[in-house]
Image: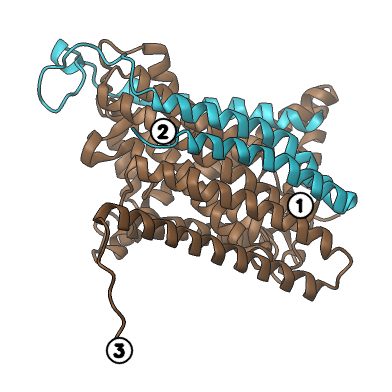
Amino acid sequence: MSFWNDPLKVAADWLEGVFMGWGMNSVLSHVLVAFLGVLLLITVLMVLDIFLVWIERKVVARFQDRLGPNRVGPFGLIQPFADIIKLIIKEDTTPGDADKVVYNLAPILSMMSVLILWAVVPLAPVILGTDLNVGVLYLIAAGAIGTLSIIMAGWASNNKFALIGGFRQVAVMVSFEIPMLTMLMIPTIFSGSMNMNAIIQSQNVWFFIISPLGALIFLIAAIAELGRAPFDLAEGESELVSGFNIEYSGMKFGMFYAGELLHAFTFGGFWAILFFGGYRFFGLEQVSPFLAVLIMILKAMVGYWVIMWVKYTMMRIRIDQMLSFNWKFLTPLAFVLLLVTALMNALLAGAPTWLYVLGMFLANVVTGWIALELARSATRQEREKLEGAKPVVEAHH
Amino acid sequence: MNEWIYVALFIVVGLIIPIGAIAAGFILGPKKPNPIKESTYECGVEPVGEAWIQFKAQYYIFALVFLVFDVEAVFLFPWAVKLGQLGLYAVLEGIVFVTILIVGLVYTWRKGMLEWA
């Protein structure tokens, strides 16, 4: 076993040897090595997060036909560091009537919830935090803490705008969690496991090709969970000024901001893991774990780019429209798709791979098409009801 | 249980990093509070009353509907994991289970609870 095949294990064994040489017992040195590993991963993530600020600003500038930051350093690369210095030396104002404990805890939890998600992200077959057998459920559980932090921020600020933002976030979370949970079951069905590594290993054909509709529903629900446009009602600046984070300044606001960006990147990563084969790319991942990490990061970036693309092209949706879209369209569709997938999975068991993939793909397309047709006829009826009975147009003779 | 140590470590480090960042801001930033600065923002006018009020019960209904579906997910995940081995019978069981949930959703819908009134 060489460093190139399993760098983490080699490094961990070496460090453990060093620590035991210093007279520590094996349990303590194991935990210490694990702690250093986690610290390394999270530090890398925080550095990445700094550059995500730059990437986000550059990409939005391109979408809006601007140049974006280009003054501080080459291509404006030093800009995020200037932002951080400004955030750190800014005065940290706290509203006098706020619930101080909850108010201060919210930005910390916001960042923490995103960082702990990376415990189950496999960057390579051997480079990962931990190989939980309930990785998919962990994703949901950890993600819920982030939503909690937004509710806490909204409530504790003692500001009416922040409160409405917090309330809206609850409504959005509770609604869009259902289709997201349901769509997480689709990779689970295909791979027969909730373990992230097992899900990636079983994707000889990308799950996106087997279940394109599932990937799409997951993306929509993920964007809603992230609270990004078109679902960014918790911070709708045109009606709520800034929503839940209105009373935050300095580094506390910075934590919300950085947390949101890293969260979006993380969900780009999850999208890649669950539906686009994660670190796998035509066998290249077997060459070296380092190459696998590169592939994983690139795929996560593509997912993140799609989320940004949606954010900067769509306009914000009203809360009642958004909730009825979820409860009356997305949730029933997600459940129907789950049942169709389960049924096809049983019917096509033992079929050759090409037939299985084709059958699943067609089932997805047909389900999506029927759903769209039903939605279209329902909206047509709604519109006719609003406009009043139209005169019947007579056919030409 | 060994792998849950890593989760615990992630939580610990995940708390340390933002606390450190906020503490740095607290130490380096100026601190000159005054009552006007500490008042909550309400678009430039004096804040009226406090914000901890009872607000729109509609959110509560959505939370209730969500609760049913969220609990259901705990039952459906093991079903999804073992679906490959269990065959068609398990699929039919799943259809029955989900149909009961969907009936609940339709009932809520028909009662007009999903309308934003």
Q: Horizontal placement of A347 versus A205: left or right?
A: right
B7, above or below A102, in the image = below
Does the image show residue B3?
yes
Q: Horizontal placement of A289 versus A266: left or right?
A: right
Q: Please name the residue shown 57% across and 45% down the image.
A: A179
Q: Gap between marks 2 and 1, in whole Å?
A: 30 Å
Q: Nearer the viewer, mark 1 or mark 3?
A: 3
Q: Horizontal placement of A233 versus B66: left or right?
A: left
Q: Nearer the viewer, mark 3 or mark 2?
A: 3
Q: Horizontal placement of A343 versus A392: left or right?
A: right
Identify the amino acid type marked 3. Answer: His
Q: Which residue lies under the disc numbered 3?
A: A397
Q: Please name the residue shown 40% across and 19% down the image.
A: A104
Identify the amino acid type marked 1. Answer: Ile
Q: Residues within 10 Å of mark 2 (few under 14, many from 20)?
A: many
Does the image show residue A125?
no
Say which mark, if any, is on residue A189.
1
Chain A visual colour? brown
- The quarter of the image holding the C terminus of chain A is bottom left
Question: What SS does tag 3 mark?
Answer: loop
Q: Which residue lies under the disc numbered 2?
A: A169
Which chain is cyan in the picture?
B
